[in-house]
Amino acid sequence: MAFFPFEPLTACALTLACLSGPVHPAGTSIALSTLDAGGRSGAVVLQCDPAGGTHPEAKGACAALTGADGDLNRVSPKNMSCTLEYAPVEARAFGTWKGTQVEFSTTYPNRCAADAHSGGVFAF
């Protein structure tokens, strides 16, 4: 069984605790986490409309999600080259996109691929 830095209830609590600015009923706040083969984990909160939270590239990540209407399975990948190194990264998202529940998890072949294939959503 895979370990994720956030379990759904923890992610929800963290997401609510990290809100900044006005809260809108149909807002966007998504807890994102990664765990790589070396045991390194990362976690951020992404807020959109306006872009913010603790994600280091919130504007770009929000733009990627907007282009896919919040569906992480439909995000357009970045045009960038990555090595073929296999160092798997488990990625997970939990929260809301414009008031709709979001839950996503996948494994990317490495951190570069996680960044590229998620359109920068998992670039942290």
Image (cartoon, helix red, strand yellow):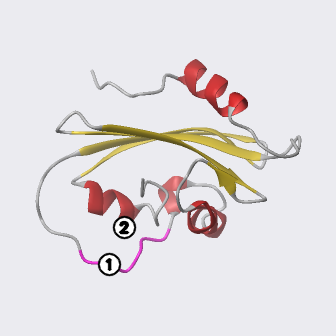
Indicate whether 6 appears above or below 21.
Answer: above
Three-letter residue code for mark 1: Met
Q: Position of residue 37 (x, y in %)?
A: 18, 39
Q: Which residue is mark 1?
A: 80
The image quadrant that residue 35 belongs to is: top left
Indicate whether 11 appears above or below 83.
Answer: above
Q: Give the spatial CA distance, label 2 vs label 1.
A: 6 Å
Q: Is residue 41 left or right of residue 49?
A: left
* Stretch of the chain drawn in magenta: 76-81
Assess whether mark 1 and mark 2 are in contact (beta carbons under 8 angstroms).
Answer: yes
The image quadrant that residue 61 belongs to is: bottom right
The residue at 32%/24% (across/down) is 3
Q: Which residue is mark 2?
A: 116
User: Circle 1: is it few (<14), some (14-19), or many (20+) Cα within 10 Å?
Assistant: few
| Helix, strand or loop status at disc 2 | helix
Q: Position of residue 101 (x, y in %)?
A: 68, 38
Q: Quadrant of the N terminus?
A: top left
Three-letter residue code for mark 2: Ala
Q: Position of residue 116 (x, y in %)?
A: 36, 67
Q: Is residue 86 left or right of residue 104?
A: left
The residue at 29%/62% (across/down) is 113
Q: Is 78 contained in the magenta span?
A: yes
